[in-house]
Amino acid sequence: MADAAVTPNAGRTAWARNLAAPVRDFLSTETGSAIVVLAGAVAALLWANSPWRDSYESLWSTNLSIRLGGGSVSADLRHWVNEGLMTFFFLVVGLEAKRELDMGELRERRRLAIPVFAAIGGMIVPVAIYLAFNAGGAGGGGWGAAMSTDTAFALGTLALLTPRGATRLRVFLLTLAVVDDLGALLVIATAYTTHVSLAALAVAIALFALLVALRYAPAWRRQASLMVGVALWVAMFKSGIDPIIAGLAVGLVTSAYPPSREDLERATALTRSFREQPTPELARSAQLGVLSAISPNERLQYGLHPWTSYVVVPLFALANAGIHITGGLLADASTSPITLGVLLAYVLGKPLGILGASWLASRRALHGARPALSWPSLAGGGAIAGVGFTVSLLISSLAFHGERLGEAKLGVLAAAVVAPLLAWVAFQLAGRLPRELRARQMASTLGDILDLADDVDPDRDHVRGPREAHVTLIEYGDFECPYCGQAEVVVRELRAAVDVVERKVAPDVAQVIRG
């Protein structure tokens, strides 16, 4: 049998790779869902321009009421999607942000600075461009529609343009999109909320505090948390503030942590008991034991994310992307400051804001951190961030009505087409840069987080080569493991490649690699 190909571990231990698995799953789901979201948007456009276009608005304006005793919650179907189902989308966004802060790349807080500054710059500059077209005019109030990146579309576009890697760029875009969503929800709560019921808001705050306290309840936490979460959403709805904020807040306080050794050993013991005596009771115990070893954050994310990616967001696109396009609307949009403001805010403002803020945040004079990405990669990522859809359409529906809403939606859809094209051009130009220049760009970036069980001890470990070398390789092996023998060939080739970098490119280009 032919030897199996050995895949390098890219400097990560098994523990580190297992920690990164939820991020890979998240990115994979978002990437695949982009196609489904696009299908929902296309279906909405076809429906809104078909002979049955009247049924489109008729369906989504249908009122749905839920009544319990003397109280009720009433809204049309479009608002149930935008304010009800989208709460789960922002819950997943909050869960992922919390997981990244506690367990992911952002647990090293210095890595948080550049993505956060980039996200802030990527909101301020687009809003400034939009207001340059609309300040003082009829569209001035819609500035919030020009600031937020769509996570699913951005990651889906990145997968199409860079199918063989760009993991750091994916994490950067994910972090940027989370900060974008936080900013957008803050804008919705402050700028697009006309009436606030202080009594309902006080009830919502009390319910949120109760929900946080339930983390320490000895039993029935899941059932109680579900009921309190529903009550929190209703209180936010009654307060006049968009209740999707509740989803993000709950996600940000849901614990994320790696499984403890005790929990893993208990799950192993329960599984062993079921194997020895396969009864329904022991099967249930083993299942609960395995689930309890995983943090509530990851359990919720694993269960909800496929639904939000493949059902909630596509349904949102179907409910909001439908525009009845006429010659008059296209003619008006071609000169409309609303359409032009949204389009240029995304395709120019986003990359300029992200690049400019990243440059400022990385300046040594300001004690900035080294960037995790090369500047050519960051330029391509900034262009991809110009894909706005979900939150942009959501704010457009709050800020505009009638023909102005159609013009804003056309600007959002046009940006979703133009931004990926600009990103493709940016990546093509980056690929044509001289190899030495690209190597120097990579050498100036921040290294990966290394999760070694123990630090290297020169007095204990076998060390080969000069200790002052620019490149350090740490090799783990077992003389009884056949795969370690296969890996030896790869390690030998890697050492040879490092020697080439040291001799032919430049000593300062060599990065410290541990793997």
Image (cartoon, grey):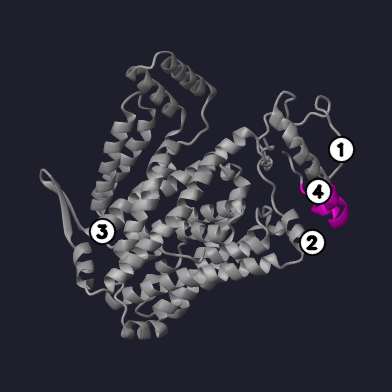
Dot 1 lies on which element?
loop
Indicate the amino acid at tag 3.
His
Q: Visible in this render: residue 284? A: yes
Residue hosting label 2: 436
- The x, y position of residue 379, in whole percent, is 62, 65
Instruction: Tell me what residue is drawn at x 33 percent, y 18 percent.
Output: 281
Compare marks 2 and 1 and give the one earlier in the sequence: 2
Query: Residue 206 shows which numbered tag?
Result: none
> In the image, what residue occupies the spot 27% across and 71% down?
48
- Alpha carbon distance from label 2 to label 1: 26 Å
The amino acid marked with disc number 1 is Arg
Instruction: Kindly report the distance in space between the C-alpha atoms of the residues bearing marks 1 and 3.
Output: 64 Å
Disc 3 target residue: 79
Amino acid under label 2?
Answer: Glu
Within 10 angstroms of label 4, few (less than 14), some, or many (20 or more) residues? Answer: few
In the rendering, at what x and y percent does residue 53 appear?
23, 72
Quadrant of residue 10 within the rendered picture:
top right
> Which residue position is annotated with label 1?
467
Decide which of tag 2 and tag 4 comes sooner along the chain: 2
Report helix, strand or loop for mark 4.
Answer: helix
Q: Quadrant of the N terminus?
A: top right
Magenta-colored span: 497-511
Residue type marked 4: Ala
- Judged by its main secondary structure, the magenta piece is helix
Tell me where residue 482 sits by quadrant: top right
The 10 Å Cα crowd at callout 2, few under 14, some 14 to 19, many 20 or more, is: few
The location of residue 144, given as percent across then percent down, is 41, 66
Instruction: For the C terminus, give its image quadrant.
Output: top right
